[in-house]
Amino acid sequence: MIMRSALRSTSLETSEFRMNGRVPTPKFSLEPGVNRKLCAWENITARGLGLVHAVTLEKYNIGDFSRMRAADAFRHWDVFSTSLISVNGKPSRKVKPGWGKQIAGGVGFLLEVPPQNILGAFRKDVWFPTHANATSYELASRIFSGEGKCGYKVKGGYKQIALPEALVNVGNPFNEVLVVGRPGVNVHFAQTEEVRVAGIVYSQHSLYASESWYDDWTLIIKLQRLNPDLEVIFV
C-alpha cells in the first residue's frame, strides 16, 4: 500500500485555483487532456462496461476479504488493481470471443469507481507492484518511475490514463486500471470518493479461471457471507 503522505491533499494549490474566477473549474483534473479522459470514464456503466477487482481463493484466505466487507476493505486500500470488462455490452470491434470479459481467476468484485479515483489505465497488464514496501515509500516511488513487478518497466510511470473503449477493444486478454481506494485524497484535482461495490462477477471466459467449478462457487459463497447484499453477475 502507498503511504498516505505520498497522496497527501494539496489544499493550497486547490484553493489558489478556485480563487481565480475567470478560469472555469475543471471537473476532475487541472490538466485538460487528463480531465477529458477522466470525463470519458464517468458513465461507463451506461455503456455496458465495468471495473472488476479479481479475487482468488488464496487471496481471500490471507487477505481482508475474509475479515471484513469488501467496501470496508477498499476504503482502507491506497492503490489496487482492477480490469475493465464488458459486463452487458459488446466490444465495438471484432476481437476474439470473450476477450472483453477476461478476469484473472474468473471471480471478482464489480466496482463503481469515481473517475478522480483512477490513477492509471493501461491497455495491457502492467504488473503494478501492489505489495511494495510502503514504509520505505517504495510504492510511491514506483508509481512515478514505472518500476513494476518482475523487472517490468512502464515508460513515463504509472500515472497514465487511456480511454475506456481503448482497453476493451484493443484485443489484449487483460488490461489494468489502477484505483485509489481511500476517500479524501487529491490524486488529480477533485478529491477521491468511496468506491462502491456493485456485485460479484463470475466470468466464464477467463483464461486462468479455477479448473474446478466447485472451487469457484466455494469462493463466491465465502464472499457472499460477508457481503450478503451483493448479487452474482455472469459475464
Image (tube, grey):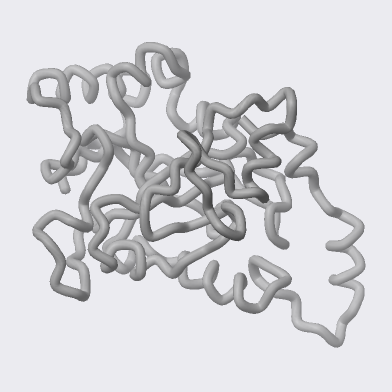
Determine the residue positioned at 64% across, 25% down.
133
Nearest the eye: 56 or 42: 56
- Left or right, 182 with respect to 72, comes to right
Give residue 18's position: percent from left, percent from top: 85, 71
Determine the residue positioned at 30% across, 50% down.
174
- Left or right, 104 with respect to 227, comes to left
State which quadrant residue 48 falls in: bottom left
State which quadrant residue 169 falls in: bottom left
Whether residue 92 is situated above or below residue 53 in the rendered picture: below
Nearest the eye: 234 or 172: 172
Nearest the eye: 57 or 113: 57
Q: How many marks?
A: 0
Give residue 205's position: percent from left, percent from top: 13, 45
- Left or right, 20 with respect to 88, comes to right
Determine the residue positioned at 15% across, 23% down.
217
Give residue 91's position: percent from left, percent from top: 21, 68
Whether residue 31 is situated above or below residue 85 in the rendered picture: below
Give residue 73's position: percent from left, percent from top: 51, 27
- Left or right, 47 with respect to 195, comes to left
Task: Tell which residue pokes out farthest to the front in this image.
Answer: 151
Whether residue 202 is situated above or below residue 27 in the rendered picture: above
Determine the residue positioned at 76% across, 82% down.
24
The N terminus lies in quadrant: top right
Nearest the eye: 226 or 145: 145
